[in-house]
Image (tube, rainbow, N blue to C red):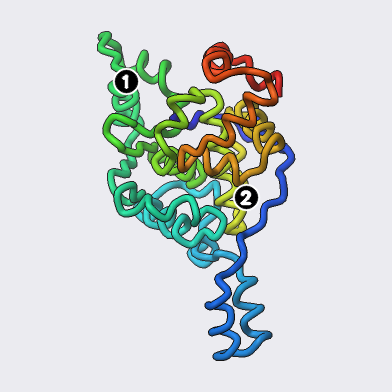
């Protein structure tokens, strides 16, 4: 739910499993071959999504007025995530309820989201929430980012919005944040951008990668975006647990160490 800011030195250079796009539609391929020829069709099908690179966007750019529209376009252009997002829009459109805020307004929004009604000075609020770079408010479906937040932070929060709410409800904050960062990085890399490096989800992301290693990224995507049960079944089989035991282990943050 929250993007936490870290120094540039605090980054995770973990291994990524190679991912591949699904097979192209055969009827489309045949139509293209008849129209433009085999070589041109091959070049067209091998093109990577380019909406972000064409716009000159980089992962560590500051957010701006076009950020939400660019993320929406990147999601819609993604060949890897398309099977899991086809029913998400326009209901969960990133361009709806995307708030870029000053530090004071953002800190107040974090405080309200946490239902913190304690009287606090501005300095106390800043000390409590100043390291939060962005968050998705599940109660309002709003994405909140600071004016100084980076494009990659906004992608992370946008992933929360298109995720199935049952994933967070079952897997909890720790695993949810790691899987969210995994798919944020996947989208950025698919668009030839770098991964987010200035976050504090090193351990969470490492846990997400263990889930990918146990199954594959598609299985994790089905669970994260569609509430498919295959990931849960695979983890229960690996750990010898039933649903209730797995849920208790998740709450105690004991799952990742055993994968």
Q: Nearer the viewer, residue 60 or 141?
A: 141
- Across and down, in percent, residue 62 comes to 46, 47
Earlier-in-chain disc, 1 versus 2: 1
As drawn, which residue projects farthest toward the right?
Answer: 15
User: Which of the 4 image quadrants contains residue 198?
Assistant: top right
Q: In this picture, is 64 found above or below 41? A: above
Mark 1 highlights which residue? 111
SS at badge 1: helix
Q: Residue at x 64, y 71 (%)?
A: 46
Q: Residue at x 32, y 51 (%)?
A: 95
Circle 1 packing at 10 Å, graded few (<14), some (14-19), many (20+), is some
- Across and down, in percent, residue 15 comes to 74, 40
Q: Is residue 117 visible?
A: yes
Q: Which mark is residue 194?
A: 2
Q: Is residue 149 visible?
A: no
As measured in the structure, the alpha-carbon distance from the residue carrying label 1 to the one carrying label 2 is 31 Å
Circle 2 packing at 10 Å, graded few (<14), some (14-19), many (20+), is some
Q: Nearer the viewer, residue 252 or 12?
A: 252
Q: Are marks 1 and 2 in contact (CB under 8 Å)?
A: no
Q: Residue at x 35, y 17 (%)?
A: 125
User: Which of the 4 image quadrants contains residue 79?
Assistant: bottom right
Q: Residue at x 50, y 55 (%)?
A: 83
- Across and down, in percent, residue 209 comes to 67, 35
């Amino acid at each position: 739910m929250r993007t936490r800011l870290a120094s540039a030195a605090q980054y995770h250079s973990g291994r990524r499993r190679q991912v591949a796009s699904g097979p192209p539609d055969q009827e489309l391929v045949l139509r293209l071959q008849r129209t433009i020829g085999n070589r041109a069709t091959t070049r067209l099908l091998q093109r990577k999504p380019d909406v972000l690179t064409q716009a000159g966007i980089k992962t560590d750019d500051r957010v701006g007025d076009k950020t939400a529209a660019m993320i929406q376009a990147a999601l819609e252009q993604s060949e890897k995530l398309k099977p899991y997002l086809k029913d998400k829009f326009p209901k969960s459109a990133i361009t709806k309820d995307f708030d870029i805020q000053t530090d004071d307004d953002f800190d107040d929004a974090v405080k309200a989201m946490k239902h913190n009604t304690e009287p606090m000075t501005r300095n106390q609020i800043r000390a409590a929430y100043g390291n939060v770079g962005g968050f998705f408010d599940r109660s309002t479906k709003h994405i909140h980012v600071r004016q100084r937040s980076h494009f990659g932070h906004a992608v992370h929060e946008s992933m929360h919005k298109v995720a199935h709410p049952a994933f967070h409800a079952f897997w909890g904050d720790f695993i949810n944040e790691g899987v969210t960062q995994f798919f944020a990085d996947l989208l950025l890399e698919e668009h030839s951008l770098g991964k987010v490096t200035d976050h504090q989800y090193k351990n969470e992301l490492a846990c997400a990668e263990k889930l990918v290693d146990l199954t594959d990224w598609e299985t994790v995507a089905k669970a994260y975006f569609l509430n498919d049960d295959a990931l849960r079944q695979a983890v229960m089989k690996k750990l010898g647990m039933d649903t209730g035991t797995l849920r208790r282990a998740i709450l105690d943050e004991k799952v990742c160490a055993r994968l």
